[in-house]
Amino acid sequence: MTTTSLPGANAQAEVPLKRRLRRAERTRQVKALALVLPLLLFLLFTFAGPIAGMLWRAVEDWEVRQVLPQTTAALASWDGKDLPDEKAYAALASDILAARAAGTVPIAAKRLNYALNGFRTILTSTARNLKAVPEPGTAKETLGKINPAWRERATWTTIKDASGPITGFYLLAALDLTRNADGAIVAAPPDQAIYRDIFLRTFLISLGVTALCLILGFPVAYLLATLPPGRSNLLMIFVLLPFWTSLLVRTCAWIVLLQSKGVVNDSLHWLGIIDAPLRLIYNRFGVCVAMTHVLLPFMILPLYSSMKAISPAYMRAAASLGAPPLTAFLRIYLPQTLPGIGAGSLLVFILALGYYITPALVGGAADQMISYFIALYTTETANWGLASALGAVLLLATVLLALVYGKLVQGQQVTGGMKN
Amino acid sequence: MSDNSSLRTPSQRIAWTATIVVSTLVFIFLIAPILAIMPLSFSSSAYLTYPLPGFSLRWYDDFITSPRWMNSLKNSMIIGVASTLLSMVLGTMAALGLAQWKSRFKPLVLAFVLSPVVVPGVITAVGLYFFFAPIGLTGSYLGLILAHTALATPFVVITVGATLQSFDTNLARAAASLGASPLEAFRRVILPLILPGLASGALFAFATSFDEVVIVLFMAGPEQRTLPREMFSGIRENISPTITAAAVILTTISVILLATLEALRRRNERLKGSGG
């Protein structure tokens, strides 16, 4: 080889090296992804899948479609202006007879009763009194005789609205809305319109608890961040011990303290402050106290880490420039704690929104939050569509707030609220 | 107070005193309930009131001899240990992978992995209830272990991930250059160094499962009731002092977990040096 060919040889050797590097990097990335993949698949099965299933249940509408298939098909072309034609009546009669034989009438009756109160009676009485398939051309008359409700347009629009395969019914109901006979979205009847109040209550309790946590947590976080490390580590136990103590233990402790013959009432009585025991639990007061106790560490820890990062030099500089302590605090210190305040408040608020156990144990009937109703409709009344729709609304609120939280703590240490 | 030498004006001293007074009250608020419940478990009376009429271990005896309570303790242990092991494997692998993975989708994947912590328990529980019932996973240990693993793994990813952030990747390269296979490098170089992070991840995972009750409420059959689940129904029905004994046992376990975690943290800080 001659020396003149060397630069060319060099260039040729460089390309494969670059490619090799790229390939090695790619292999590394594939390996990295392969390490994450098992967890992603696992969470797909144990978390994302189930939640997607719940969201689907909030909109799926299969009962009427399955139990009354011919009616559903006959109503598909009905414009909803007048009563449906004889064909739809005949289809309904035949569906009802088939459903009675199969024992599926209650499934459709339950679904239709959600949409129109009293529909259960209409359907079951019709199923009971319909003796045989009506003669051709007389189905309308026969059904109308058994139950006059079949002569009303609203009865039929209810069936048509509920004939699936998907429905906005439960989601609307979760927001106290419904569709009227003309398909317009209107306010739900007052006896069914309870969910806005429940959401509002959930929101207000969460807001109150967040405010209490902030008021109580701020001085504590300030103290912990200002004291020398030895002492603040010792005092940190007062925050971490409750944080690590079981939720059930803490809730139980508050019941013991606040009950009518509990420590607090006894002490107040002994001190002569009260004559009769105060009602401190199984009401809003008890819920707020117990929830604040449970969530306070989630406020103190992020506040503490944001305050820990503030250099005392700023306050000294403010003082040396002539700012009175209060001004220095309000204009120099407080603004720097704002990310901590925001993160802590959002975290507490998000956690409070979904609370179930504490209100269920120390709240009265008027203090139950949205989670309680989701649980109730799932396990007690088996109104799964409504449970899922309420869950979807709660999930949406949580996800939106979590996105804000994510933006807020971006750049801060992820473990800010988690110690270690 | 004397340690705060920068306090010069009277108003600063007042503010500082106020901070101490308020903080002390909050500390009392935080700790008093937990302390107040403990002596009651040693009371000879069936009423949960002070003053205690006498000392007795009858409620602990009640706890230990009750098949219901002992079964729940056993279940908590089985489910806690199993989901800790599973979440350690999945979470550590994922944390190692995420530390090396470079992609603009990484924040999205991380958010997804961490989301079980944020989503309200009831939503996860209802979703799992619908999803697991048709495949026979409700009323089974496996179903609960899988569900608790999903809740616990984010904590493992966070703690192990935090440890990996301070881990010097040159050490792994050095091991490779000295001829170690990737598995050997992991076992003999990486693992010992991230072990404290793994241990705190495991403690978090165990604590998460051990304290979880909403999913258990929805998914456990009578056979799988855990300690918190048993306490939940106990509190609902009537608060017998046996619950206070259970509470003391649960709190003792929490204190042991917390102390272990603190010891790990101190050891870690010592290893990192005073600067860490």
Image (tube, helix red, strand yellow):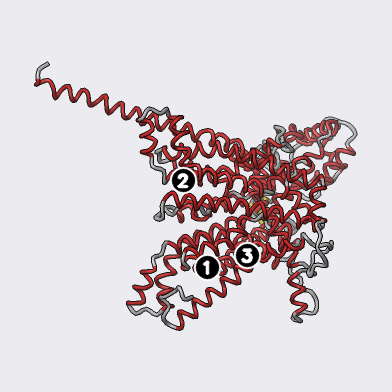
Q: Are marks 1 and 2 on the same chain?
A: no
Dot 1 falls on which chain?
Answer: A
Pointer 3: what residue?
Answer: B30
Q: Is residue B46 above or below residue B137?
A: below
For label 3, count other residues whose C-alpha is less than 10 Å away and answer few (under 14), some (14-19) or many (20+): many
Q: What amino acid is found at the position of numbered circle 2 in the picture?
A: Thr
Q: Which mark is residue B163?
A: 2
For label 2, count other residues whose C-alpha is less than 10 Å away and answer few (under 14), some (14-19) or many (20+): some
* Closer mark to the observer between disc 1 and disc 2: 2
Q: Sequence order check: which comes first, mark 3 or mark 2?
A: 3
Dot 3 falls on which chain?
Answer: B
Pointer 1: what residue?
Answer: A218
x, y (%) of residue A132? 88, 31
Q: Nearer the viewer, residue B29 or A295?
A: B29
Query: Quick check: B95 left or right of A46?
Result: left
Q: Nearer the viewer, residue A297 or A139?
A: A297
